[in-house]
Amino acid sequence: MMRPLNPITAIPPIRRPSFRLAAVLLLTTATLASPAGAGTAHLPRATDLATHTAEAARRGEPLVVLVSLPDCGYCDTVRKSYLGPQAAAGEIAVREIDMTADTPLRDTDGTMTTARAWARAHQVRVAPTVLFLDRDGKQAASPLRGLQPDFYGAYLEQALGQARAAVAASH
């Protein structure tokens, strides 16, 4: 029931929406706003970096590699909030490597290794780490290590810009 206007201020009283209504609106907005792929559990797994970097280079893009850990909340945030939506929109070429896995991985020089050994060889000690590789598997921009939530999107865009410029200059 609505209270009468305050005769002194003539301002209607503020009505507070119910918690249930707010939750429904929040969930609906999040569902409608989330791009396809943003809720994916993982990005495509890296299996052959020579092929992956060559495909990215043909598009004029660096290969973005997310090096992650299982059950890593920060990795999930980077995957679902940043890399997943950009990959789903076709804006980036991206692969994921589990830094603890012994899954086989072909490196850019054609040698076989494991995901764990590859991460160690590239001095990845923190998850998430995002690497930007050119066609030869060299770093095209400085890696993003960890998650800096306040400015992560800006750091990612800056690194992508640097990596794209490096890939363009190498052609």
Image: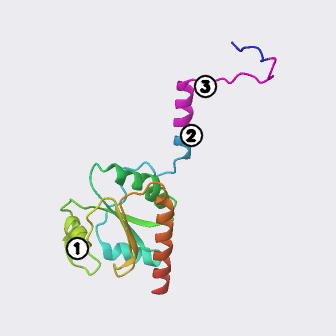
> In terms of sequence position, does the residue under pointer 2 or pointer 1 come before the other?
2
Query: Are discs 2 and 3 less than 8 Å apart at CB?
Result: no
Dot 3 falls on a residue whose secondary structure is loop
Q: Residue 17 — which label? A: 3
Dot 1 falls on a residue whose secondary structure is helix
Residues at marks 2 and 3, CA–CA distance in whole angstroms: 16 Å
Residue 97 seen: yes
Residue type of the residue flagged with mark 3: Pro
Q: Residue 12 — which label? A: none
Q: Residue 29 — which label? A: 2
> In terms of sequence position, does the residue under pointer 2 or pointer 3 come before the other?
3
Residue at the location (56% across, 43% down)?
Answer: 32
Residues at marks 2 and 1, CA–CA distance in whole angstroms: 42 Å
Residues at marks 3 and 1, CA–CA distance in whole angstroms: 54 Å
Reading the image, the residue beneath label 1 is 121
Write down the region rendered in magenta: 7-29
Q: Is residue 77 above or below residue 170?
A: above
Magenta-drawn stretch contains 49:
no
